[in-house]
Image (spheres, coloured by chain):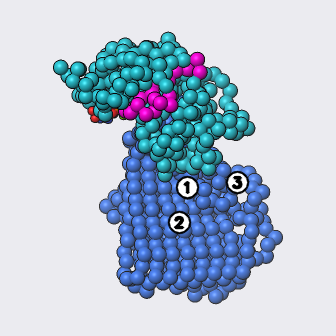
Chain colours: A blue, B cyan
Amino acid sequence: MLSAELNTTLQGIAQKLDPESEKGKALSHFLDKGFPTSKWEEWKYTSLKDFNGIDRNWFPKGNSNLPVSADWAELIIRSSDAYLSIEKPSSNEGMEVLSFDEFIQKCPEFQEIWSDKKPILDQNSLYDLNVALAPQHTVLWIKKDVEISKAILHQYQVNSTEKSSSVQSRLLIYLEEGAKVSLMEQQTSTGSADILSNFVQEIFVSKGAQFTYLKDQDFQQGVSHIDHTFIYQAEGSQVDTFTFSLNASLIRNNLHFYIEGSQVVSNLNGLYVPGENQLMDSHTVVDHRMPHAESNELYKGVLLGNATGVFNGKIFVRQDAQKTNAFQSCRNVLASTRATMNTKPQLEIWADDVKCSHGTTTGQLNEEALFYMRSRGISLPAARTLLLLAFVQEVINKVEHPVLRESLTEKIIAKIQQSVDLSN
Amino acid sequence: MLSIKNLHASIGEKEILRGIDLEVKAGEVHAIMGPNGSGKSTLASVLAGREDYEVTEGTVQFLGKDLLDLAPEARAAEGIFLAFQYPVEIPGVSTTNFLKSAVNEIRKYRGEDPMDAVQFLKMFKEKMAYVNIDQSLLSRALNEGFSGGEKKRNEIFQMAVLDPKLAILDETDSGLDIDALRIVAEGVNKLKSPNNATIVVTHYQRLLDYIVPDYVHVLYKGRIVKSGTKELALELEERGYDWIKSEVDQ
Ligand SMILES: Nc1ncnc2c1ncn2[C@@H]1O[C@H](COP(=O)(O)OP(=O)(O)O)[C@@H](O)[C@H]1O
Ligand SMILES: [Mg+2]
């Protein structure tokens, strides 16, 4: 449970909120539950128990002014400790970046979509914490049939002060019918103190719309990042996500796809490379609520040092979701004998006419292959690097954007090469 | 070039090589024959540096260096090449990328500058001719889904690129039809020079019709029990191994 000090702080915040408001209710839920511990089934390997004892600066001020340069981006937006700035505006009138209140005024019909959403929030007290403490949503709104040909760059930054801090940030993305856009997100941090970064994204993809979302999670050690990405897909839409988890003390990704129309395509790609003293946890949900849709999930992990990895992939095929095709694969390489990986695929199928397959594997690099390579003159570290790179390439190669593909490849090579375990 | 003295090697509690002596000089071709399970692949593996085997006694000198002291990659850089009896699949790494790494790692070891893409292209093209290998095969993941013949041909292509001083061919003939065998053997012969040496490990004498050995050794129960010239191989072809076994087992 929460420590007395933390409890006092949060109660103080609660007193300023209307207990009947959304925020007030959310905070009271959080105060009841606290941070998840390993006793919670969904957090078995990713206990946040210690956070119950850490009082933080709950409203840090955004202060980062890292320079931005990305010729390839149509629009650059930045969330610095949840404070939005537009770093490079776009003249394209087919999209807008605005606050939730402004958005609802301009687009009242969204109210119904918003109140009809049914996310799965079991054992997710951090969502409540986010609702309670986050400033208004930043809304990215792409209008009907608008196709943004260059990508949008979102720089998500958390910045530490002397004291432990916590950043609660919310992003809402609304693609109207037939819209098409790619969002590239760089998640980074500055400073070296301990930060809890808690980021909620709610994405509504209307009929026939197409959305690509790439996350490059590259924080400093000391950051614990909890990511909630909930994607609601209407008929005939396609969403491709790419989640690259490169650095942080702890990353927990809750990626949910709610398939709410037929002919939907959902592609989930993920790659995590945790190293020394890092934990990376991917909890994915693909909820087939409507028939004739397909989902493909390809996750890979390379675990270095004493890293811990977690993959929990849930696929629900509801009774109405006949003719569903759902595919899931999670493959991991333990590049060190000190690393551990916990995998759990979970399929729950209530429809009878469906095709589902899943497979998870965790293994070491093949010793025979390593000897073969060494016998041709390739040193052990180089041989390991080559095999690991070949392993991760499958996911990286799916990224269409050449600049991002290269920068990800370089960062991953550097991280693998740095790993001390390669040479022994 | 290579001097093996009283070499003993075991795996676990089991002694497999039980006192091998062998001298190989530059320009020579040695054939090592012997029944299945006699230790031929073990000898080849120990020379290449496979760590599963423990050398319990004896010495191996290669060009004046203590070979047993070197890591497998250092042996390769010093000029040893083992063509595997069972080449290993390297998922996701093409032959060309694999060889670029190998060549440049070896050059680094020798203190030479790395080769660039243009130089590689030229070199690969030249060496492809040795074994009639196709570009498409070289772009595929190494050995993955290769036929037996493609694997062996690829081994000889790698040998051509790495240009070793001592090549050890472990049952390079096994699983090959007669045409593939001829191509592989021709490749090996073209690579032969007065400065390098070859050890051909084989179970049958068939390959020796194409790669003519200067010396033939028979390995049995971890020892070289008979040495001779190529006539010995012909005799083995005719009479089998039983007469040698019974001579030794007496
Ligand atoms: N990795 C191993 N583990 C246990 N026994 C082995 C291993 N490798 C080889 N041996 C044994 O050593 C002996 C020699 O094997 P090998 O060198 O492969 O013979 P050859 O190549 O002459 O057929 C055989 O009895 C074989 O079973
Ligand atoms: Mg053998």
Identify the residue position indicated by label 2 in the image.
A268
- Mark 2 crowdedness (10 Å alpha carbons): few <14, some 14-19, many ≥20: many
- Please provide the residue range marked out in magenta: B193-211
Along the polypeptide, which appears first: circle 3 or circle 2?
2
Measuring from the top left, give residue A141's x and y in whole percent. 68, 76
Along the polypeptide, which appears first: circle 1 or circle 2?
2
Identify the residue position indicated by label 1 in the image.
A394
Q: Secondary structure at mark 1?
A: helix
Q: Please, is residue A99 above or below residue B57 in the view? A: below
> Residue at the spot x=39%, y=26% of the render?
B234
Q: Is mark 1 within 8 Å of ligand 1?
A: no
Q: Please, is residue A95 above or below residue B219 in the view? A: below
Which residue is most to the front?
B238
Measuring from the top left, give residue B115's x and y in whole percent. 68, 32
Q: Quadrant of residue A113?
A: bottom right
Q: Is residue B201 left or right of residue A96?
A: left
Disc number placed over residue A403 in the picture, else none: 3
In which chain is the residue bearing label 2?
A
The reply to the same-chain question for discs 3 and 2 is yes
Q: The residue under label 3 is which amino acid type?
A: Val
Closer to viewer: mark 1 or mark 2: 1
Q: Please, is residue A31 above or below residue B148 in the view? A: below
Along the polypeptide, which appears first: circle 1 or circle 3?
1
CA distance for labels 1 and 2: 13 Å
In which chain is the residue bearing label 1?
A
Measuring from the top left, give residue A381's x and y in whole percent. 51, 35
